[in-house]
Image (cartoon, rainbow, N blue to C red):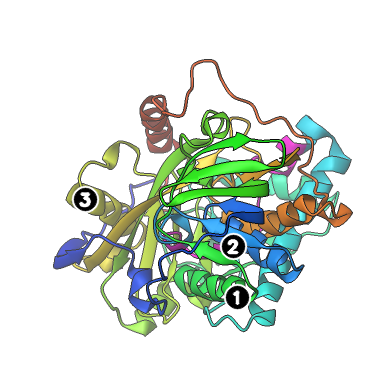
């Protein structure tokens, strides 16, 4: 097979190194916090997880304050690709080997339920965020990857209902117009949204329900007392009956026991200049979300207005300064779509996703302190679902049970929160990707 040709994307002269999504943000600056002396629940982290938990708690009548060291949502919640998926990182066969078929099925069913939950959250709260269930296509970068996808799908469909089909290479142009791939797997029930608009709507809903939002108010430390948890913040002390840690890839030294178990991984995205909508719809028919099978995977999609293409990936060793990162991602996009030769990149940004050492999502409530985090880069739906479940746990509601309960949250003796090993790992993944194919058929 001949190597696939690549397009050459250029950087716009006035490229912006902040999320393209932020252009549509309608939220005004939040007021300076007025903190109560005591609350029922304090939440650390104002992203999707924390706000979903806050909304559930506030609507139950509890007093809630959400702390964020910056402006809520300025981390991954308004920097992600806006893809609403139902996949767990290990995949169904791996889950079955680790936990058994019954537990694996329960986990996958819960991941699917998270998509239904976020859709209901959007509808019930009237959040205008360009949500749609347009589906997702997972193209295979080699025939070997396609065959592995087929086996995994067959194994999962033998155990549970999955709304997905395999697409052979000769039919792929109906779903993706790229010479790079060898067919793939099409999922019907998932979709996408505008992440910043969604976060703005979720924040408004939580505030409307009575949750206090303490923006730009870092939690510096915590100490358990006879009557609760005392939190030290930059503007004073607050005592809470319970504390929920919802910091994901931004988990820091205020909760060192969590920081030592969470691996933050940088993910970066570029957005093209406005294109002919007919070209965008021809390259990605149906406006679907796309995630390919590289280790350093490409995830990409049309913008909600259909005028741009956004692509994200792990920087690997192609990172560096902002300009180099944008060029690196532009080369990846040009290899997928050679027709974008000469197209300008107008935006480039990055954020942090979080993994656990065993790659599974984590949720737990022990005494007065609970946590939900580690979505493995697939957290738009799962973060909202587990935030809601964590709130139920904090209230002692049995409805808060999840398929992810009672899992260990492992650490490693060589890790204290600084992921020094990611560089060598990314280099290995990059080499593996280079050897795996991605060739013109």
Q: Position of residue 60 (x, y in %)?
A: 77, 67
Work out whether 251 lies above or below 330: above
The residues tagged by marks 2 and 1 sit, at their Cα atoms, a distance apart of 9 Å
- The label nearer to you, 3 versus 2, is 2
In what element is the residue under mark 3?
helix
Asked whether 193 or 209 is in front, the reply is 209
Q: What secondary structure is the stretch in magenta mostly built from?
A: loop
Work out whether 73 lies above or below 307: above
Residue on which the image places disc 3: 322
User: Is residue 81 found inside the magenta-colored segment of the image?
Assistant: yes
- Dot 2, how many residues are within 10 Å of its Cα: few (below 14), some (14-19), or many (20+)? many
Residue on which the image places disc 2: 51
Q: Position of residue 393 (x, y in %)?
A: 78, 50
| In the displayed structure image, the side of residue 401 where residue 240 appears, left or right | left
The numbered disc on residue 205 is 1
- Dot 1, how many residues are within 10 Å of its Cα: few (below 14), some (14-19), or many (20+)? many
- The label nearer to you, 3 versus 1, is 1
Mark 3 or mark 2: name the one nearer the start of the chain.
2
Is the Cβ of the residue at disc 2 closer than 8 Å to that at disc 1? yes
Mark 2 or mark 1: name the one nearer the start of the chain.
2
| In the displayed structure image, the side of residue 47 where residue 313 appears, left or right | left
């Amino acid at each position: 097979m001949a190597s696939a040709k690549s397009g050459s994307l250029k950087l716009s002269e006035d490229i912006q190194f902040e999320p393209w999504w932020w252009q549509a943000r309608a939220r005004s600056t939040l007021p300076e916090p007025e903190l109560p002396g005591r609350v029922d629940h304090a939440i650390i982290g104002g992203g999707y997880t924390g706000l979903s938990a806050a909304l559930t708690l506030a609507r139950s009548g509890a007093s809630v304050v959400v702390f964020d060291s910056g402006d809520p949502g300025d981390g991954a919640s308004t920097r992600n690709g806006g893809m609403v998926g139902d996949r767990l990182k290990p995949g169904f066969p791996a889950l079955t080997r680790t936990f058994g078929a019954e537990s694996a099925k329960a986990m996958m069913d819960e991941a699917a339920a998270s998509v239904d939950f976020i859709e209901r959250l959007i509808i019930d709260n009237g959040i205008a965020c360009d949500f749609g269930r347009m589906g997702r296509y997972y193209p295979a970068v080699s025939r070997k990857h396609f065959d592995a996808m087929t086996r995994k799908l067959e194994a999962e469909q033998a155990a549970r209902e999955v709304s997905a089909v395999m697409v052979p290479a000769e039919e792929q142009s109906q779903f993706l117009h790229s010479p790079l791939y060898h067919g793939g797997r099409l999922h019907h029930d998932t979709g996408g949204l505008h992440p910043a608009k969604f976060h703005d709507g979720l924040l408004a809903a939580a505030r409307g329900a009575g949750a206090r939002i303490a923006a730009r108010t870092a939690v510096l430390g915590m100490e358990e007392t006879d009557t609760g948890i005392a939190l030290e913040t930059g503007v004073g002390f607050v005592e809470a009956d319970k504390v929920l840690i919802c910091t994901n890839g931004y988990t820091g030294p205020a909760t060192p026991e969590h920081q030592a178990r969470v691996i933050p991984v940088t993910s970066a995205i570029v957005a093209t200049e406005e294109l002919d909508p007919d070209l965008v719809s021809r390259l990605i028919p149906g406006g679907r979300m796309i995630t390919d099978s590289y280790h350093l995977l490409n995830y990409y999609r049309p913008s909600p207005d259909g005028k741009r293409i956004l692509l994200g990936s792990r920087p690997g060793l192609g990172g560096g300064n902002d300009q180099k990162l944008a060029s690196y991602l532009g080369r990846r996009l040009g290899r997928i779509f050679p027709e974008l030769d000469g197209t300008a990149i107008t935006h480039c940004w990055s954020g942090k996703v979080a993994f656990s050492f065993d790659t599974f999502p984590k949720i737990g409530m022990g005494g007065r302190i609970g946590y939900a985090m580690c979505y493995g880069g697939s957290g738009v739906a799962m973060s909202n679902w587990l935030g809601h479940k964590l709130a139920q746990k904090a209230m002692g509601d049995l409805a808060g049970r999840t398929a992810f309960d009672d899992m260990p949250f492992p650490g490693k003796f060589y890790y204290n929160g600084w992921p020094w090993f990611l560089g060598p790992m990314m280099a290995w993944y990059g080499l593996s990707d280079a050897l795996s194919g991605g060739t013109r058929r």
